[in-house]
């Protein structure tokens, strides 16, 4: 049995390892939550596994989802992940906007109490 790796099959796992290490270091520096750490590590490990054995993973996903074509299953999963990330980022932006509004109001109240403009 001949086993050869395409360029992406060794490059994607290397990139994944780099980003996994980077994500862990960000978590240790308190720049990433545990939830974020787990999500991103899961993403990069999944990407590496998919790069190493693309046919097996895509066939399994297609079978699990009841989709006849494995390419459509990958597109479906990819869109789902993108929509999840967009929703997550949108929620984070909304939360940050509320926090900024609250801080500005508190600052304005404090300045008004001190008689500043």
Image: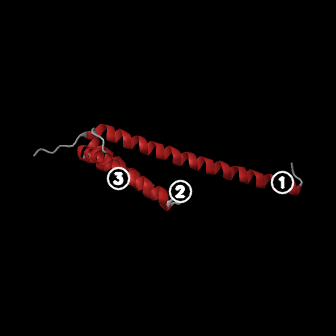
SS assignment at label 1: helix
Q: Are marks 1 and 3 in contact (CB under 8 Å)?
A: no
Q: Are marks 3 and 2 in contact (CB under 8 Å)?
A: no
Residue 45 — which label? 3
The circle drawn on residue 111 is 1
- The residue shown at (34%, 47%) is 47
The tag earlier along the polypeptide, 1 or 3, is: 3
Q: Nearer the viewer, residue 79 or 63?
A: 63
Q: Which of 28 and 40 is in front in this view?
A: 40
- Pointer 1 local density, CA inside 10 Å: few below 14, some 14–19, many at least 20: few
Image coordinates for residue 18, horizontal then vertical, percent: 38, 51
Q: Which of marks 2 and 1 is nearer the N terminus?
A: 2
The residue wearing badge 2 is 31
Place of residue 69 in the rendered image (x, y in percent of width and height, measured from the top left): 27, 38
Asked if disc 2 and disc 1 are in contact, CB closer than 8 Å, the reply is no
**Residue 5: quarter of image:** top left
116 lies left or right of 73:
right
Q: Distance between the residues labelled 1 and 3?
A: 50 Å
Number of other residues with Cα within 10 Å of mark 2, as a class: few under 14, some 14 to 19, many 20 or more: few
Identified at 37% across, 50% down, the residue is 44
In the picture as drawn, the residue positioned furthest to the front comes out as 66
Front residue of this view, candidates 106 and 10: 106
Residue 9 visible: yes
Q: What is the basis of the colouring in this image? A: secondary structure
As helix, strand or loop, the secondary structure at mark 3 comes to: helix
- The outermost residue toward the left is 1
Of pointers 3 and 2, the one earlier in the residue sequence:
2
Residue 62 image offset from top left, x and y in percent: 29, 44
């Amino acid at each position: 049995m001949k086993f050869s790796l395409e360029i992406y099959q060794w490059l994607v796992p290397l990139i994944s390892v780099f980003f996994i290490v980077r994500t862990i270091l960000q978590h240790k520096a308190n720049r990433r939550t545990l939830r974020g750490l787990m999500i991103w590590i899961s993403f990069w490990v999944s990407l590496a596994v998919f790069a190493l054995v693309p046919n097996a993973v895509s066939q399994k996903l297609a079978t699990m989802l009841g989709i006849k074509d494995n390419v459509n299953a990958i597109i479906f999963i990819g869109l789902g992940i993108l929509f999840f990330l967009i929703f997550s980022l949108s929620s984070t932006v909304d939360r940050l906007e509320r926090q900024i509004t609250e801080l500005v109001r508190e600052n304005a109240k404090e300045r008004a109490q001190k008689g500043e403009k």
